[in-house]
Image (cartoon, helix red, strand yellow):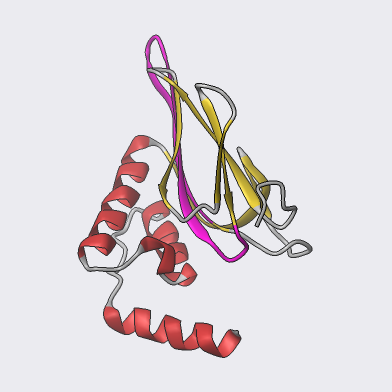
């Protein structure tokens, strides 16, 4: 696929030291285009899942700390708008504030320690994590049984 393919979902990443940092925690981009020394564009094929972190600070400290899990969609499919993501995607998880972002990062680390690729985790699990963290509760761990059920369901849907 070409970077300008209209079926791709594009994410703008920015890095301005001690001011703005946008980065992908996990995901498999098919294109990585450098715009200048501070900005890049990553593109993802439909059906991809990625974790996108946005952080910003001013002279007094952190002013923005957000983490979104986005699943890219086919053109013509309903989607939510997500800052710096074009055109948008299926928003599986969206938290803000450092304590919630940190909690989700710990969940991602745990998933990786259990041997799962966060890109391959069931979208329903990310929704579960979102709902539990927003409610101030601990999410259930992602297990081999849940993953096997997700893989079977995904095969049936394809």
Rendering coords of residue 61 (x, y %): 36, 17
Rendering coords of residue 147 (x, y %): 36, 79
Residue that appears at 20% across and 62% down: 113
**Looking at the image, residue 85 lies above or below residue 63:** below
Instruction: Name the residue furthest top.
Output: 59
Of 135 and 120, nearer the camera is 120
**Looking at the image, residue 62 lies above or below residue 152:** above
Residue that appears at 26% across and 61% down: 112
Residue that appears at 59% across and 85% down: 157
Classified by dominant secondary structure, the portion drawn in magenta counts as strand
Please give the count of numbered marks on the rendered protein.
0
Residue 29 is one of the magenta-drawn residues: no
Query: Dividing the image into 4 quarters, which one contains the C terminus?
Result: bottom right
Of 115 and 30, nearer the camera is 30
**Looking at the image, residue 63 lies above or below residue 8:** above
Rendering coords of residue 55 (x, y %): 43, 30
Instruction: Name the residue furthest front.
Output: 2
Q: As drawn, is 84 to the left or to the right of 5?
A: left
Q: As drawn, is 158 to the left or to the right of 100?
A: right
Of 116 and 142, nearer the camera is 116
Residue that appears at 54% across and 62% down: 48
Identify the magenta region: 45-70
Rendering coords of residue 46 (x, y %): 62, 63
């Amino acid at each position: 696929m070409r970077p300008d393919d209209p079926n791709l979902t594009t994410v703008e990443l920015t890095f301005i030291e001690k001011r703005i940092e946008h980065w992908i925690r996990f995901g498999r981009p098919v294109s990585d285009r450098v715009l200048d020394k501070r900005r890049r564009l990553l593109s993802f094929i439909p059906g991809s899942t990625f974790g996108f972190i946005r952080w910003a600070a001013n002279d007094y400290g952190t002013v923005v700390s957000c983490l979104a899990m986005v699943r890219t969609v086919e053109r013509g499919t309903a989607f939510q708008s997500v800052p710096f993501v074009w055109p948008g995607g299926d928003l599986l998880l969206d938290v803000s504030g450092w304590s919630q972002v940190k909690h989700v990062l710990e969940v991602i680390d745990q998933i990786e320690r259990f041997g799962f690729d966060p890109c391959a985790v069931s979208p329903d699990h990310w929704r579960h994590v979102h709902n539990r963290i927003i409610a101030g509760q601990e999410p259930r761990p992602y297990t081999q049984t849940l993953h096997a059920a997700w893989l079977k369901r995904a095969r049936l849907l394809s």
